[in-house]
Image (cartoon, rainbow, N blue to C red):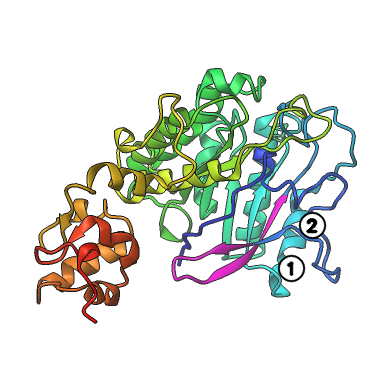
Amino acid sequence: MAVEVEEEPGSTSACLVSQAACSPGSPTARPSGVANSNLPITRVALPNGQSMPILKTVLTSVCEKNCYYCAFRAGRDFRRHTFRPDEMAQAFLDLYRGGAVKGIFLSSGVAGGAIRTQDRLLDTADILRNKLGFQGYLHLKIMPGVERAQVERAMQLADRVSVNLEAPSTERLARLAPQKVFIEELLRPLRWVEEIRKSQPSQKGWKGRWPSTTTQFVAGGAGENDLELLSTTFYLTRKLRLARVYYSGFRPVTGTPLENQPAINPWRQNRLYQASFLIRDYAFDLEDMPFNGAGELPLDVDPKLAWARAHLSEAPLEINRADLHELLRIPGIGPRGAHAILSARRNNKIHSLSDLKSLGIRTSRAAPFILLDGYQPARQPALF
Ligand code: SF4
């Protein structure tokens, strides 16, 4: 069975997945028998609510690019590490067989060009799958500027593939990573993934299905506003069917050109995630987002609550008549809760907040914006 996971966002070393895990000077993988406490192992959430540990690591921390935010940029002075594909595959498999991890998220610095770097990532994946018989979770990073055939090969080996866009547009990327080309090197591979999925629906990838796709932005690194980030997110989610967009809040790294630029407010990162879920799971359009005149989301209230206050405070929705789209607009009601309401309504009217609570609804959030059989529960006096 292929797994759909929710991974933690990476750091501002966007294409190298985890600054904490791969901090300069620390090894990214170790042979078997070595304690795991310093290894870059992270837990990822599974759809069933459980989680599993995966190794987030890089084939090499050498990089010939000069991204302004990145601890691994060319010329920055620290001890770097490189693994051969067979070394990495075996080191990971030892960890896997020892029970330390259940999967791997494999990336790399760009060394010897994108195509050679991608070939080494593919070689590692190929050894894992076809020589060592690894059947668990594999997330493969796609390097900027690879060939279409390499993308297709990655899709045949991995459960998930990703390309980090870093910024929402060509102009913004130039302020973060001037050696990367937004459309040709970063966006095009994501388009190829979707083209391949659509054009070859029956010839599927690993374990009979094509991998999911994700990307990551260095949020707040290029002076972009939330509207810019979410406009690109909207395109990626609706047109290219990305499973997840990650926002890695910018944090300055010593010894980089952006070392004096302030870190972003962590609330901004949270609001971006909430807005991206509204786009992906709640059918919200960009026009529904409560941007201010500067194209920013409010920090003090989540975007769904802000929308409800503006649109439902004076026109609450009748829970017994609202359709799926309307139910998803109500704070405290998610996709699962909305379907539970629709299902329960087929048998009986929903009369009370306790009825709703029994369906998994967060009634304290929903109450100000709903009617229950004609009554607004938030305004009902207590019976006793
Ligand atoms: S390509 Fe850029 S972000 Fe990726 S490791 Fe190299 S310098 Fe860092």
Quadrant of the rendered image containing residue 143: top right
Residue 29 badge: 2
Amino acid type, label 1: Leu
Residue 95 badge: 1
Residue under the image location 80 percent in, 67 percent down: 36
Front in this rendered view, residue 114 or 132: 114
Front in this rendered view, residue 198 or 289: 289
Residue under the image location 65 percent in, 59 percent down: 128
Q: How far across and how far down the image is residue 164, in percent?
A: 57, 37
Quadrant of the rendered image containing residue 374: bottom left
- 45 to the left or right of 305: right
Query: Does 157 lie within the magenta span?
Result: no
Magenta-highlighted stretch: main secondary structure? strand
Q: Secondary structure at mark 1?
A: helix
Magenta-highlighted residues = 43-57
Q: Is residue 275 visible?
A: yes
Q: How far across and how far down the image is residue 310, in percent?
A: 28, 41
Q: Secondary structure at mark 2?
A: loop
